[in-house]
Amino acid sequence: MKKLDIPALEIFVAAVEEKSLSKAAERENLVTSAASKRVAELERHLERTLLHRHGRGVEPTPAGTLLYQRAKAILRSVQLTESAINGYSADGQAKIRLASNPSTILQFLPDVMGRFLADRRDVSVDLLDAHSYDIPRLVAETSVDIGIYHADHPVPGVASFPFRRDRVGLVVPVGHPLAGRGELFLEEALDYDLLGYFPRHSLDQFLAYAGQTLTRPPNVKLQVSNFETRCRMIREGLGIGIVPEGIARNYLASMGLALLRLRDAWAERQFYVCVRDAAQLARPVEELLRALTASTADAP
């Protein structure tokens, strides 16, 4: 006996949802005649009328309604199976797709990933450097398996777990008029040119986030995304810059820089680990999630 055909179920589900074979065909990238043929073959195979055709389009018969409900479950199961298989490389080894922002990659991941991968020779990790505001979307769309982002609150649409906190500070050259301040509000540094990036990745986004704490926009002549390059340019007197404190400390002595604590509330950041559905994770992804969330308790 011929088994149910997945492409036929896909076009049938699309026809029910779109209430039109032509719209269903467009959605599935088919010509209308091909879509109609697949539905007709499905009806012949099941020996049941599944769709009523009329001038306004199509609607399911009672048998068609039952098939629609079951077909949705079947197609969802196929999608989950394909997603799970995507967690393995071409040679059959486990592969985890991890997206993280640069701050986390530099400050927190080397230690955690070193311990996680030390005794897992059958697991590999593809690490994607991405902006925090993109990462939950990448996870929700299953473009990656797990993500790490910073935000004031967990982002809806994904399952998020607290990871780490950090602070950003203001880096200036030793000898700069502000170098002896120790701590200050960013407002107090607005008379000096500032090098980007910002905690919200662009000046406009940063001002929307922190604008109430500033009486005027900072004077930004140069946007520099790489932390080390930003510190080098600060050393050369091209401006002062906002840098995560844990990263800035790597360059202070060697580059003759000073780190000032920013008293602004937005200077402290909360990082989250997120997955699409914590109840349906491939074993390696579940183990990495446990390793990341467990490392929170170990953080100083």
Image (tube, helix red, strand yellow):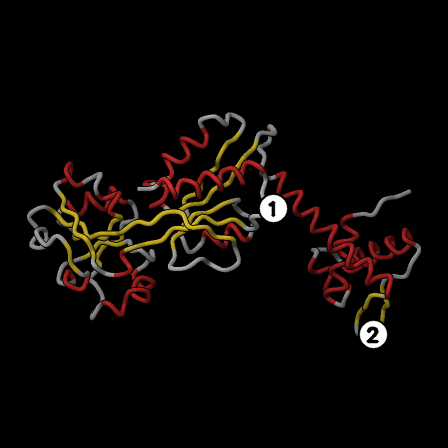
Q: Which mark is residue 55?
A: 2
Q: Nearer the viewer, residue 7 or 119?
A: 119
Residue 189: give x, y in percent of width and height: 15, 60
Vertical placement of residue 169 versus 127, above or below = below
Instruction: Say left or right for 223 vs 288.
Output: left
Q: CA distance from mark 2 to mark 1?
A: 43 Å
- Judged from the image, the secondary structure of the residue bearing numbered disc 1 is loop
Instruction: Give the residue type that dot 1 points to.
Output: Gln
Q: In x, y percent, where is residue 23?
A: 72, 64
Look at label 2 and name its amino acid.
Gly
Q: Is residue 67 left or right of residue 24?
A: right
Q: Between residues 22 and 153, which one lies in front from this camera angle?
A: 153
Task: Name the residue carrying label 1.
Answer: 280
Quarter assignment of residue 58: bottom right
In this rendering, would 86 be left or right of 253? right
Q: Pointers 2 and 1 in contact (CB under 8 A)?
A: no
Residue shown at 55% from the left, 52% from the top: 141
Split into 4 quadrants, where in the image is the N terminus?
Answer: top right
Q: Which of pointers 2 and 1 lies earlier in the amino acid sequence?
A: 2
Please tell me how crowded label 1 is: few (under 14), some (14-19), or many (20+) other residues with Cα within 10 Å: few
Residue depicted at x 86% and y 66%: 61
Residue 110, compared with residue 4, is above or below; it is above
Say whether residue 269 is left or right of residue 260: right
Assign a secondary structure to mark 2.
loop
